[in-house]
């Protein structure tokens, strides 16, 4: 078990910098998640408040991705 | 029976707490020498002494998936179900990092989501080094804050499937949890501003013909 040094007294400065990088990455990740969620919500609100015509227009411009592939004939 | 759950233990997530550890891993622990020699008859008090002796954490390793002492002690805690105050003491203690992460791991398994966030997140500020045993039986370097992050974001750890934890913002919007303020929040704002400033400066000459 001695091949990995876990003494917290050595290299304290370096360890602190390492932690700082990790913590900042975590904040960043958290914020990105939140903005993505907020965006999605906003989009949904927008769609819901549209009138029938606006909705049709929107769907024409942003067609849904085709999830079901067209079936092939068996030979 | 040394492998029986304390009859006074409450059900966790609707089942015997020991069932949180999958059957195969559990049987590996029951046949482990550390489990047989050191975990027999442990109580909440004597378990602390064992936890203080830990020098690494991990799940199972090697070809026959041998369990680490850390995993054995986790199962022991599920068996004897120490009171919440004791688990919180584990987490709050500053002197023994492995006692701390053992408590954190246990709370993640049995605790309410709000408790999990409230007690585990302060440990994001603990960057002490930990020794982790990988599945191949090698040791690698980890840190307390990384361990906590894994507990809060992953769905399994140390060969145990972690109970589902709602996202933080779900709990926040339900009003059961206050937003977390990181120790580096101010620092982050500054860096963000700097980046934006640089972007603006970088973009400005481009627009000029």
Image (spheres, rainbow, N blue to C red):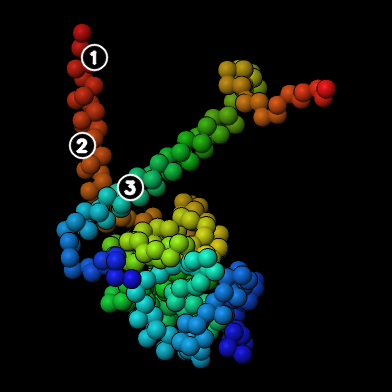
Task: Quadrant for the N terminus of chain B, please.
Answer: bottom right
Marks 3/2: CA distance?
16 Å
| Secondary element at image label 2 | helix
Please name the residue shown 58% across and 88% down the image. Answer: B2
The chain ID associated with circle 1 is B
Q: Which residue is mark 1?
A: B207
Name above or below for residue B103 compared with residue A65. below
Q: Are marks 1 and 3 on the same chain?
A: no
Name above or below for residue B175 compared with residue A42. below
Neighbour class for label 1 at 10 Å: few (<14), some, many (≥20)? Answer: few
Residue situated in front as seen by the camera: B89 or B69: B69
Q: Which residue is mark 2?
A: B194
Please name the residue shown 52% across and 79% down the image. Answer: B32
Q: Which comes before the other along the chain, label 1 or label 2?
A: 2
Residue situated in front as seen by the camera: B33 or B157: B33
Q: Are marks 1 and 3 in contact (CB under 8 Å)?
A: no
Task: Point out residue B55 in the picture as x, y percentages from the top left corner.
Answer: 34, 74
Name above or below for residue B75 compared with residue B47. above
The chain ID associated with circle 2 is B
Marks 1/2: CA distance?
20 Å
Q: Are marks 1 and 2 on the same chain?
A: yes
Would residue B27 appear left or right of A14 to someone viewing this image? right
Task: Point out residue B75 in the picture as x, y percentages from the top left corner.
Answer: 52, 77
Name above or below for residue B27 compared with residue A25. below
Q: Which residue is mark 3?
A: A25
Q: Is residue B134 visible?
A: yes
Please name the residue shown 50% across and 83% down the image. Answer: B33
Please name the residue shown 22% across and 68% down the image. Answer: A8
């Amino acid at each position: 078990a001695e091949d990995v040094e876990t003494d917290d007294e050595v290299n304290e400065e370096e360890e602190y910098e390492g932690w700082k990088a990790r913590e900042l990455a975590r904040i960043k990740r958290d914020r990105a998640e939140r903005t993505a969620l907020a965006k999605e919500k906003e989009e949904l609100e927008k769609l819901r408040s549209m009138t029938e015509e606006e909705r049709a227009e929107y769907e024409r411009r942003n067609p849904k991705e085709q999830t079901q592939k067209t079936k092939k004939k068996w030979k | 029976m040394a492998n029986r759950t304390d009859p006074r233990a409450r059900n966790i997530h609707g089942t015997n707490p020991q069932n949180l550890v999958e059957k195969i891993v559990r049987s590996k622990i029951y046949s482990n020498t550390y489990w047989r020699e050191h975990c027999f008859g442990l109580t909440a008090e004597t378990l602390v002494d064992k936890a203080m002796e830990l020098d690494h954490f991990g799940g199972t390793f090697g070809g026959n998936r041998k369990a680490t002492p850390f995993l054995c002690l986790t199962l022991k805690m599920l068996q004897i179900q120490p009171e919440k105050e004791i688990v919180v003491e584990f987490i709050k203690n500053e002197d023994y990092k492995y006692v701390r992460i053992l408590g954190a791991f246990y709370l993640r398994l049995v605790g309410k989501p709000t408790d999990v966030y409230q007690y585990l997140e302060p440990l994001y500020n603990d960057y002490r080094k930990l020794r982790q045993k990988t599945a191949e039986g090698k040791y690698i370097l980890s840190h307390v804050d990384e361990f906590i992050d894994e507990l809060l974001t992953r769905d399994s750890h140390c060969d145990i499937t972690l109970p589902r934890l709602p996202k933080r913002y779900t709990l926040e919007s339900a009003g059961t949890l206050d937003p977390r303020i990181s120790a580096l929040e101010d620092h982050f704002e500054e860096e963000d501003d700097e980046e934006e400033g640089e972007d603006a400066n970088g973009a400005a000459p481009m627009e000029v013909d």
